[in-house]
């Protein structure tokens, strides 16, 4: 016994006491986000109402939608030709497309993945670029994608972020089967990561920035550049040929208005935060200034007008790769052709508007700050 | 150290303690080291490796993000310069005025001249120069290009004036409605310098509110390459010695010089090389992240890649990389340090454990030494340890125990002495018994050895089976006979290994009954199968074996291999059968010959007397023809029964074969290939050449019939020496040299049943009426009559081979002259005595002779012949004697007549040349024999020859 005690003491000295190297997650709110009840939406009389699907939870797409929603010039222009426009908030592009296929939505802004899916199966015209920004993989305690092997990763199915996640896994030589894919709504992701229900997630702005800001030790370990587009149904263009240019003019006008004064950009950020809170039942964990900065970074600073870049449509370009990806996975009909998707992209309407700034009152601004409803 | 397990000396208590403590401590150290290096699973403790690695990755990411931000900021600043210049109302006004002058002026020189006169133009150019100067020479040059004409109308470099940009895609894009600003990287073709060019539209002064103005000109700012390349340079503090930042455009064109040469040794120049690596491609395509990969030189690196979006059309890829070897060098040093630390600690621990173990083990060792002395017999030894600890108590107990043992020892010694005396007596008695038993066992072993030797040397199969039928003993003879080895046989079932399946159940049942009823047939015969599948016939002498308690323990059997014996018996049976058939056929043929002789003789007389025009002559001719065929039949039968008359001469077998070559070719036809393979040796035999030729023709005919669709017939000859056994096995009378004629065909062959009967007379496989069944019987008889042997080898579908063995003669007499003789039908007037027991033959012969002018005296038997001869002694010129007659045969009659008249001429006739003919009659030279049935011509010719021969 006399010798055993010093031995145990010696062993205790040799063995290091584990020190907590990672802090416990600070955790955001654990209450899950409310999902909107789309069945309460009033789409009105299809013959005289234009319904536009927007995403307040996506920046800058949601910001542009909020500004256009308040554009009195657009409303009055449409009223002159006997039309009314209504904007409806959705969680993600896939939700919008479900209503578009039912004929209830005439125009929308969504990421490139939902845009391609709709263009391959429906008659639409993709008329403008709404975003060029990154979808990101956010995680805690990992610094490389390879470190995610075997981990649970949340992702919004068939979205830009889904594609970004797969691109990230491929870059590290991993397959989907090497990780545990957890489909979930973007609104749940930050909470899920904070409470360790998942180990990482793939999402877009502002979800990723919000998580990075509010979850300790969170890091964006992979980013993938993707785009969002504005598109209208050919049915709308055929029924009301004047309507699409007026809507495009409103979008260009929104760009000009936001870029013209910093206050305008901040105001549009506030509008977006309000819309997001109304949609998901809780506020985004970002300030209006941060929303404004993201908007500037992901669209306003990179283009003077929302014209679709030629490079997007090139053979071997990002859209073609995503089309092939979804076709392989059976997410778009096997008979769908890339040519059909390509023909859906139209730069003519927006070019025509840009060449007639006076006619479409691109540089005139009249927004209704009080309008929040559809 | 003997190395033997029985001499293994266990480690001492001290060593075991040392090893135990050392191993325990080493394990602890390793666990501690691994956990401190790599963390503890399922906890948040990540370990030094994870922390250092995270730190390195974080640093790399941070540097990449910083450099990306700096570069984008730098470009954004320059874009801001352009925007400030282009959106300035003053500049827009100046540009509007100057550009309006361009549109109204003609050629470039005139335009320049006109512009130089303009105060606005001077203000504009001064502003350009001031802008360049203000920004600390960041710009190489600044140009202003008229939107309408594409001509450079102002520049910080005077030489640029008039340069046309109408075809510049960036210029065209800038003046279009879609893009306000275009950025591109370009290379000055003259200087080779790299520039980042920013094109920005300048709109004319608005004419009214809400009017944006038209694009009047394009401002082009040329950033010096050093400006942004410098921002990408890294120092060792930030990125280490191996760190590098690489920039490519969206087409992967390299912007920055590379730190290391490519694997081919070249150092590519910016804008002249596509750096297509995994990370540059990912970065250019819009991906951002961090990968462990290999760089353009194949070196493992950690690479953070970033996408720099300059505008909606232009994106660059940036890679910040550092060699993995450098990044992880501190971690390797950490592992080295840990190993060193662990080794030192382990040594210290071992030293400490050694000291503790020595202290703990000292009293135990003392006790151990004392125990060893007690073990060696020192029962007076005592431990001096008076302590109260565990070892002290143990020592005192040990002392008490030794004292007790000493007392017991003394008592035991006394008892042992008493018992020892008893045991000595008993031992002597036992030794006597053991010696007796040893002698008995030796005798038994010797007996068993003799018995075994006997069994091993005897030419009989010896086996012992256990009650289950498994072999427990077998002798070498069985092994030699069957081809198995002893190891393969012993322990195996006798019935499964040796008894053919066809009789296995029967033999097993017999054995089983014997084991149940203790009744086993003492003699038994059954086949056994050898390893090669051959069958041997064994005749067994069996006996039951019983154990000491009288129970059955198996059987012992001695077996005679009677396979050859049985085979010889079969051959003998076959030979006797053929002999019997031959006798029968010979007898029948003899009688038929007598009948035919009479028929033919009478027919000849009728034919002679009838005259040429008699209608009966045709019938007589037919009878003669049929009789001739019948005579041929009886001739073949006689040949088979070896009772034909042979005209024996010496000739060479090869010549005989060559002599019939053409005939054989004709016999077999054109569909069959015929070839000879004759030996060069001479093969002289004593034989009837005609019969031999007949044999070959018969075999060829047989071969032809076996090859209806063609094939090959080969006749071979060779010489062979047969010893006594071989000769015996082949049915030959004596050993010696033999000529062998081998006749082989590739025909349909025959089965065993056909082979068995192939030489029997009237056995045929041909259709009814197509064969007499006497061909091969005749062959058999002829060969046997010549002292030879014929056998057949054949299998269905594989052809047939006949082998003929004929005894060779030593002298080489000239080959016979086989020239045919001209025959006449001469008559005579001499007196002839015809002695024939068959009345028909006798009468017809007499009639023929009388018809030919002879005087004929008839006698029906030997006695009558002697009587008749006595009566006509002076007139009888020739006696015609039947050889075979009852009571007194032809030879006996001849001998008696010779006594009466020594020179009497005699012509013997016979239906067959039986042994009597062969051994008695034919042995004497000068005696003549006429084979029945004979033709009149033959008879008359022979009589005439003999009568004329003095």
Image (cartoon, rainbow, N blue to C red):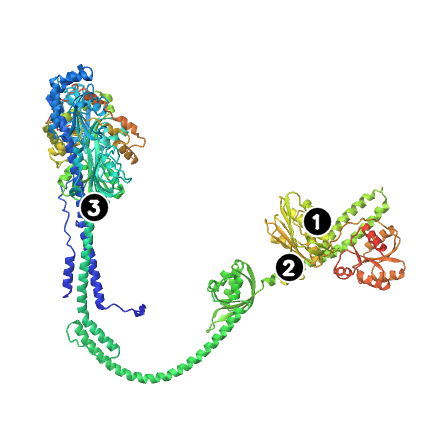
Secondary element under disc 1, as helix, strand or loop, is: helix
In the rendering, which numbered label is found on residue B721? 2
Q: Quadrant of residue B167?
A: top left
Place of residue A46 in the rendered image (x, y in percent of width and height, measured from the top left): 21, 24
A80 versus B582 height, above or below: above
Q: Which residue is pictured at 44% across the width and 80% down the height? A: B436
Task: Quadrant for residue B31, please give it.
Answer: bottom left
2 or 3: tag closer to the N-terminus: 3
Residue B384 position within the rendered picture, expressed as x and y whole percent measured from the top left: 17, 77
Q: Tell me which label, 1 or 2, sits earlier in the chain.
A: 1
Q: Chain letter of disc 3?
A: B
Q: Horizontal placement of A315 versus B236: left or right?
A: right
Q: CA distance from mark 1 to mark 2?
A: 25 Å
Considering only vertical position in the picture, is B737 above or below B293? below
SS for callout 3: helix
Tell which subunit mark 2 falls on: B
User: Viewer-nearest of labels 2 and 3?
Assistant: 3
At which x and y percent is residue A317?
Answer: 26, 31
Residue B769 seen by the camera = no
Q: Which mark is residue B326?
A: 3
């Amino acid at each position: 016994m006399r010798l055993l005690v010093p031995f145990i003491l010696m062993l205790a000295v040799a063995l290091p006491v584990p020190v907590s190297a990672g802090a416990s997650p600070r955790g955001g709110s654990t209450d899950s986000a409310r999902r909107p009840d789309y069945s309460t939406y009033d789409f009105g009389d299809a013959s005289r109402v234009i319904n536009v699907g927007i995403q307040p939870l996506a920046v800058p797409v949601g910001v542009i939608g909020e500004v256009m929603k308040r554009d009195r010039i657009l409303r009055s222009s449409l009223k002159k030709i006997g039309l009314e426009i209504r904007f409806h908030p959705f969680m993600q592009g896939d939700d919008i497309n479900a209503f578009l296929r039912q004929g209830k939505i005439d125009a929308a802004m969504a990421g490139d993945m939902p845009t391609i899916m709709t263009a391959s199966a429906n008659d639409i015209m993709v008329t403008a670029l709404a975003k060029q920004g990154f979808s990101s993989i956010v995680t805690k305690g990992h610094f490389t994608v390879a470190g995610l092997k075997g981990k649970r990763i949340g992702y919004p199915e068939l979205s830009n972020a889904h594609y970004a996640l797969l691109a990230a896994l491929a870059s590290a030589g991993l397959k989907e089967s090497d990780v545990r894919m957890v489909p979930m709504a973007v609104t749940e992701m930050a909470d899920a990561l904070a409470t360790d229900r998942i180990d990482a997630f793939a999402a877009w702005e502002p979800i990723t920035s919000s998580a990075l800001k509010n979850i300790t030790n969170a890091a964006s370990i992979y980013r993938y550049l993707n785009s969002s587009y504005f598109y209208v149904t050919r049915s709308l263009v055929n029924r009301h040929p004047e309507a699409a240019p007026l809507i495009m003019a409103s979008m260009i006008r929104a760009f000009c208005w936001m870029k013209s004064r910093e206050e305008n950009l901040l105001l549009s950020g506030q509008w977006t935060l309000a819309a997001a809170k109304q949609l998901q039942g809780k506020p985004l964990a970002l300030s209006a200034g941060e929303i404004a900065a993201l908007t500037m970074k992901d669209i306003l600073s990179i283009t003077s007008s929302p014209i679709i870049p030629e490079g997007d449509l090139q053979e071997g370009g990002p859209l073609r790769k995503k089309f092939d990806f979804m076709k392989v996975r059976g997410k778009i009909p096997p008979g769908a052709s890339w040519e059909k998707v390509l023909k859906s992209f139209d730069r003519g309407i927006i070019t025509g508007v840009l060449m007639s700034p006076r006619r479409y009152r691109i540089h005139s601004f009249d927004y209704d700050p009080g309008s929040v409803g559809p | 150290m003997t190395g033997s397990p029985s001499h293994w000396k266990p480690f001492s208590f001290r060593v075991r303690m040392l090893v135990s403590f050392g191993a325990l401590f080493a394990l602890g150290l390793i666990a501690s080291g691994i956990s401190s290096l790599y963390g503890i699973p399922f906890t948040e403790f990540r370990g030094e490796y994870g922390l250092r690695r995270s730190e390195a990755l974080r640093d790399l990411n941070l540097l990449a993000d910083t450099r990306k931000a700096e570069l984008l900021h730098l470009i954004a600043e320059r874009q801001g310069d352009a925007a400030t210049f282009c959106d300035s109302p003053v500049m827009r006004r100046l540009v509007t005025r100057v550009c309006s002058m361009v549109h109204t002026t003609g050629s470039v020189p005139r335009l320049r001249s006109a512009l130089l006169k303009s105060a606005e133009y001077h203000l504009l150019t001064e502003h350009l120069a001031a802008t360049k100067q203000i920004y600390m020479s960041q710009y190489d040059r600044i140009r202003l290009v008229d939107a309408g004409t594409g001509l450079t109308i102002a520049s910080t470099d005077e030489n640029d004036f008039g340069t046309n940009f109408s075809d510049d895609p960036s210029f065209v894009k800038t003046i279009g409605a879609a893009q306000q600003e275009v950025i591109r990287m370009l290379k000055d073709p003259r200087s080779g310098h790299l520039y980042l060019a920013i094109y920005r539209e300048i709109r004319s002064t608005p004419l009214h509110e809400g009017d944006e103005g038209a694009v009047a000109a394009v401002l082009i700012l040329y950033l010096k390459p050093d400006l942004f390349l410098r921002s990408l340079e890294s120092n060792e503090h930030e990125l280490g010695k191996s760190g590098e930042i690489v920039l490519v455009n969206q087409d992967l064109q390299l912007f920055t010089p590379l730190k290391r040469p490519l694997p081919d040794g070249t150092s590519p120049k910016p804008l002249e090389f596509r750096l297509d690596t995994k990370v540059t491609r990912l970065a250019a395509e819009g991906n951002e992240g961090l990968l462990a990969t290999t760089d353009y030189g194949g070196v493992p690196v950690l690479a953070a890649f970033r996408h720099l979006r300059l505008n909606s059309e232009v994106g660059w890829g940036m890679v910040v990389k550092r060699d993995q070897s450098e990044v992880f060098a501190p971690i390797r040093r950490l592992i080295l340090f840990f190993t060193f630390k662990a080794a030192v600690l382990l040594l210290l621990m071992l030293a400490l454990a050694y000291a503790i173990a020595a202290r703990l083990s000292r009293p135990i060792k003392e006790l151990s030494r004392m125990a060893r002395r007690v073990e060696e017999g020192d029962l007076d030894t005592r431990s001096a340890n008076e302590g109260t600890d565990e070892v002290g108590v143990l020592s005192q107990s040990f002392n008490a125990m030794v004292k007790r043992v000493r007392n017991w020892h003394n008592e035991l010694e006394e008892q042992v002495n008493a018992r020892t005396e008893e045991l000595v007596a008993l031992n002597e008695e036992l030794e006597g018994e053991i010696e007796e038993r040893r002698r008995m066992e030796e005798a038994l072993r010797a007996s068993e050895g003799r018995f075994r030797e006997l069994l091993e040397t005897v030419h009989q199969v010896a086996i012992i089976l256990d009650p289950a039928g498994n072999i427990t003993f077998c002798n070498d003879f069985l092994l030699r006979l069957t081809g198995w080895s002893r190891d393969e046989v012993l322990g195996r079932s006798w019935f499964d290994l040796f008894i053919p399946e066809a009789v296995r159940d029967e033999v097993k049942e017999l054995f089983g009954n014997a084991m149940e009823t203790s009744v086993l047939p003492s003699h038994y015969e059954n086949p056994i199968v050898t390893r090669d599948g051959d069958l041997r016939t064994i005749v067994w002498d069996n006996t039951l074996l019983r154990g000491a308690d009288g129970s059955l323990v198996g059987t012992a059997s001695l077996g005679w291999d009677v396979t050859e014996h049985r085979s010889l018996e079969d051959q003998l049976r076959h030979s006797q059968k053929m002999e019997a058939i031959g006798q029968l056929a010979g007898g029948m043929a003899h009688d038929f010959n007598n009948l035919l002789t009479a028929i033919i003789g009478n027919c000849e007389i009728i034919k002679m007397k009838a005259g040429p025009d008699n209608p009966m002559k045709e019938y007589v001719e037919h009878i003669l023809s049929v009789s001739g065929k019948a005579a041929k039949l009886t001739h073949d039968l006689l040949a088979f029964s070896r009772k034909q008359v042979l005209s024996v001469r010496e000739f060479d077998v090869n010549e005989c074969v060559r002599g019939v070559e053409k005939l054989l070719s004709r016999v077999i036809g054109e569909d069959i290939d015929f070839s000879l393979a004759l030996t060069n040796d001479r093969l002289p035999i004593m034989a009837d050449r005609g019969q031999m030729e007949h044999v070959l023709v018969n075999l060829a005919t047989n071969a032809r019939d076996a090859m209806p669709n063609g094939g090959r017939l080969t006749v071979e000859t060779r010489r062979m020496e047969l010893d006594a056994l071989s000769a015996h096995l082949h049915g030959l009378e004596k050993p010696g040299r033999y000529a062998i004629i081998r006749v082989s065909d590739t025909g349909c062959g025959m089965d065993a049943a056909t082979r068995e009967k192939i030489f029997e007379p009237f056995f045929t496989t041909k259709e009814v009426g197509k064969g007499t069944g006497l061909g091969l019987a005749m062959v058999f008889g002829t060969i046997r009559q010549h002292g030879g042997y014929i056998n057949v080898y054949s299998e269905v579908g594989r052809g047939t081979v006949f082998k003929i063995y004929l005894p060779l003669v030593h002298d080489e007499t000239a080959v016979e002259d086989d020239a045919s003789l001209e025959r006449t039908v001469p008559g005579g007037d001499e007196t002839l005595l015809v002695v024939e027991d068959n009345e028909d033959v006798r009468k017809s012969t007499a009639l023929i002779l009388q018809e030919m002018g002879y005087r004929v005296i008839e006698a029906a038997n030997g006695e009558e012949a002697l009587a008749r001869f006595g009566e006509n002694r002076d007139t009888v010129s020739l006696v015609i004697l039947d050889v075979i007659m009852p009571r007194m045969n032809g030879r006996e009659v001849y001998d008696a007549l010779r006594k009466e008249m020594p020179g009497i001429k005699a012509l013997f006739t016979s239906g067959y040349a039986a042994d009597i003919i062969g051994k008695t009659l034919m042995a004497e030279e000068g005696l003549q024999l006429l084979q029945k049935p004979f033709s009149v011509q033959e008879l008359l010719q022979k009589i005439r020859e003999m009568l004329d021969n003095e």
